[in-house]
Image (cartoon, helix red, strand yellow):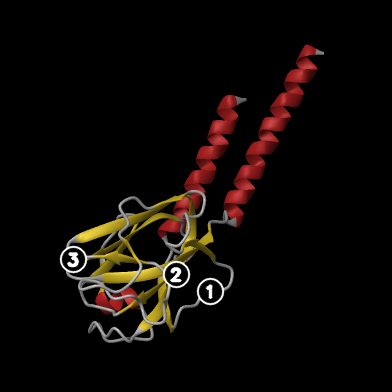
């Protein structure tokens, strides 16, 4: 029975991985601080992170300073990633989409998804395009849809001062239909094996 369960689990994981490998990331942005429908705020920096999330070493600020400007309209605490530094938000359960509110977009701001390639400047913000000129009056919510793939970490970094952001939200990972089918088949096989064993002992 243990072998059957293990095989079913491996097939389900392989199916999920195959679906994720072909996923295309879509990056869009909206002016202002908005949380997309269906997303859950996981990091506001005014309260503990949502369960299952961690972000060690986060530089949390309350007001603008000489090296970091509070995103426009934001009156709460925010994350400042200063020059030459980075910070990683990790999730145990994973997510299929995420968003964050950022201000003063710069060409040297970057992020990575699960340790992949660094996405810089205007590519980081997606469409519509905004100038990466550090304008402290510009703030927008950036939304990443991972196209069905599941990620477990986002690293925010900056090569100079600074990457300022707040209100990170995620959309939970939901198994794809093929994965559900494999999981159900695995449970069915396990149930059949248990029934056969009971008959053998009866």
Viewer-nearest residue: 55 or 62: 62
Q: Are marks 1 and 2 in contact (CB under 8 Å)?
A: yes
N-terminal of the pair, mark 1 or mark 2, is: 1
* Residue 131 percent coordinates (x, y): 27, 86
Asked which secondary structure carries label 3, the reply is: loop
Residue at the spot 45% in from the left edge and 53% down from the top edge? 18
Q: Nearer the viewer, mark 3 or mark 1?
A: 3
Circle 1 is placed at which residue position? 36
Q: Residues within 10 Å of mark 2 (few under 14, many from 20)?
A: many
Q: Is residue 135 above or below residue 1?
A: below
Q: Are marks 3 and 1 in contact (CB under 8 Å)?
A: no
Asked which secondary structure carries label 1, the reply is: loop
Q: Does residue 145 appear in the picture of this structure? A: no
Residue at the spot 66% in from the left edge and 44% down from the top edge? 184
Please give left or right for residue 181 compared with residue 11 in the image: right
* Residue 125 percent coordinates (x, y): 34, 77
N-terminal of the pair, mark 3 or mark 1, is: 1
N-terminal of the pair, mark 2 or mark 3, is: 3
Circle 3 is placed at which residue position? 83
Residue 99 marker? 2
Q: Nearer the viewer, mark 2 or mark 3?
A: 3
């Amino acid at each position: 029975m243990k072998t059957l369960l293990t095989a079913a689990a491996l097939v389900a994981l392989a199916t999920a991985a195959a679906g994720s490998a072909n996923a295309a990331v879509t990056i869009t942005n909206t002016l202002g601080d908005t949380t997309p429908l269906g997303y859950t705020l996981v990091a506001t920096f005014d309260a503990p992170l949502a369960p299952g999330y961690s972000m060690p070493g986060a530089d949390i600020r309350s007001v603008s300073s000489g090296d970091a400007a509070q995103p426009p309209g934001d009156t709460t605490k925010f994350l400042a990633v200063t020059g030459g530094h980075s910070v990683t938000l990790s999730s145990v359960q994973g997510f299929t989409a995420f968003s964050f509110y950022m201000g003063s977009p710069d060409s040297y701001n970057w992020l990575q998804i699960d340790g992949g390639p660094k996405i810089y400047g205007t590519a980081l913000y997606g469409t519509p395009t905004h100038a990466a000129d550090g304008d402290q009056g510009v703030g927008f919510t950036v939304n990443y849809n991972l196209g069905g793939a599941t990620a477990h970490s986002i690293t925010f970094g900056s090569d100079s001062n600074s990457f300022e952001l707040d209100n990170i939200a995620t959309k939970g990972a939901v198994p794809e239909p093929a994965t559900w089918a494999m999981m159900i088949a695995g449970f069915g096989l396990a149930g059949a094996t248990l029934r056969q064993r009971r008959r053998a002992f009866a």
